[in-house]
Structures are given as structure tokens and as C-alpha cells.
Amino acid sequence: MVAAFMLFTAFIIYSTITYYDPPQELVLYENARPDTIHCDLDLNVLSWNIGYAGLGDDMDFFYDGGKRVRDTRQRTLINLDSIHAFLRRNALQSFFLIQEIDIRSKRSYYFNEMDTLAMPATFTALAPNYRVKFVPIPPPVPMGSVNSGLFSMSRYLPESSIRYGYPGKFNWPVRLFNLRRCMLVNRYPTTNGKEFILINTHMSAFDDGSLKKQEMQYLKDFVQNEYQKGNYVVTGGDWNQSPPGFPLTRFGEVFKSESFRLTNIAADIMPPGWKWAFDPETPSNRYLNEPYTLGKTSRCILDIFLVSPNVEVLHNHTFDLNFRNSDHNPIQMSFRLKK
């Protein structure tokens, strides 16, 4: 009993020492000669939570009321290859926003997914949000080492790429084994002297709502400040919330889930003129309490774009991939920066 206690104490001390705690603002890249984006040019952006290539349609997951921790190595590789093939088929996008990409994590068999998915002739940036030496749950098959984050790609060279940490943490010691949520911000000059701000985000999921509230307030203040400067702002990613006012049961009886409580983004969080762009006809996420079965498994919309008033939304679309290789479907938006 004493030996077990000493071992546990040593593990907690080790986890505390190795706890990933980056500065609130971490500069990943700076360039004095960035590309300039022309206003009134049609642009497009694709966002996808790829579920680290380990959450295909055959999977359930212990955090969401299922039982499994990871898929087989073969199926994970199949998922990764299929995700890569989809991105290559859509290679003409101006920007890519990827969430849950792994870099040598146990749950994805130590594949370097960033190297696999990086597109030719694109700028790439990675903002880590989940770096843990050893996640001890669930026993007796723990998740182990995790290194994951937000991954942005661009056909334009930005002026800067910066990781901004979201406020709020889980209580100790749970925080030692959880995500450090953040947003990845790329900044580009434009032909009218203003800047285009592209934000890749992934909000908290399994909290009591208090973390999401802090994250949303931080993001709101950030994007409003940029817009007040005259800059253009597009934010995309996995919000772990449904769009304002969107019916929560549109794609299934999600209220029955005990693990993930679906809520709407507050309807009044953004001032008039800001737009939430999403495809209301196609779910972007499916629940992981069971392997995916069309017509049975609950689905919802969690993946959305938030657009400032000086950006014109031309088209938005969710690719219905039937959650074959990820628990999320990719979303895409075409837009134009107004002069």
C-alpha cells in the first residue's frame, strides 16, 4: 500500500513538472515580407476536425459514453490516407483549418499526421493544445502519450502566426492530463491597408460550461478589437456548441447523452452585422457513444464560421462524408473581403 502511494505521488510530481504551460501569447512565425491579399478576390477556407484519424465510423469512445480508447493501427492508417486524399481533392482552397491533428501520439500509433497532411506549396503552422507525457485514463488501457493541436495551412504567406491561449483551466490535478485550449491566428496584409485575420479555434467539450463561457468571451473581445481597427476577421473550427438558435434535436435526440451536453452559442454574443456561416441541412458531428449507424446515431452541428461585417459570405457547405474517417464532416466557405 505504501509502495503504491509513493508510486502515485511520484507520477503526479512527474506530470506536474512536465505539464505543458506555454505563454498566453506564443509567436510561431513572423515574416517581414508576407503576401498581400487582394480585396474583392474570391477566397475559400476549409475547416475539419479530423479526430486524429482515430475516430472513424467503426469507433465509439470512452469519453463520450463508449468503451474504446483507440482504433486498430490498420484502420487508423486507412483513415489518415483517406483524409489526405480528401484534402488533395480540395487542394485549391485558399486556407485550411485543421483540428485534432496528432504528432506521434500513442492513440494514433505515433504517426506524424502533420507531415502526411501538409499540402504542397502551402504555409503551415501548428499550435499545440494537448501535450501530455502520459494520460492515465481509462484503466486498465490508458491513453498514454498525446501530442496534438491546431494545424493551419495557407496558400498565402502570413505576416505572423500566433498561438493565443484561452483562459480557464480544469482543477488540479485533472488539468495535468487535459487540453490547453487555444486559437491559432494568422495575420495577412491586404491591398486596402487593413489586415485579414484568420482564426483556427477548438473550444472545450467536457466541461460544465464555465470554460466555454470564458473562451467565448475572450474570442469575442479579440475579434471585435480587430474589427474596430478596420480589419477583416474569419474564425472557423470546432466550437463544441451549435449555432445560435439552431434546433438542438435537428439531427437526433442529443439530449439523451450523459457525456456531452449540447448547447447553443448565445444568440446575443455578437453585435449586429456579424454572421454565423454553416450548412443547416447537413450535420458536421456525430456522437461517439456507439459506432456510427445512419438513422440511429445522434448528430449535430458543431463546426461553424464566424465572419465580421466587412466580409461577404458567398457560399458555405458541409461535405457529407458519412463520418467514415472522422467523427466530424469538413465544412467549407467561400467569401470576399469588401473594399
Image: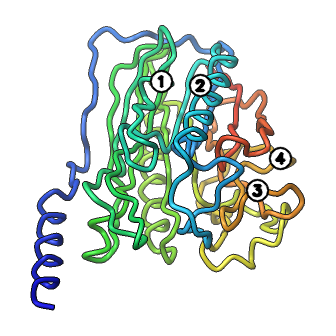
Q: CA distance from mark 3 to mark 4?
A: 16 Å
Percent x, y of residue 77: 55, 34
Residue 210 visible in this rendered orientation of the protein: yes
Q: Which residue is mark 3?
A: 292
Q: Which residue is mark 1?
A: 116
Q: CA distance from mark 2 to mark 1?
A: 7 Å
Mark 3 or 4: the one toward you: 3
Disc 3 on helix, strand or loop?
loop
User: Are there few (<14), some (14-19), or many (20+) residues within 10 Å of tag 4?
Assistant: some
Please tell me the numbered disc located at residue 84: 2
Q: Amino acid at mark 2?
A: His
**Residue occupying the point 28% across, 25% down:** 29
Residue 274 visible in this rendered orientation of the protein: no
Q: In the rendered image, which quarter contains the C terminus?
A: top right
Q: Taking 59 as reference, is 13 left or right?
A: left
User: Are there few (<14), some (14-19), or many (20+) residues within 10 Å of tag 1?
Assistant: few
**Residue at the farthest right position:** 295
**Residue occupying the point 49% across, 39% down:** 200
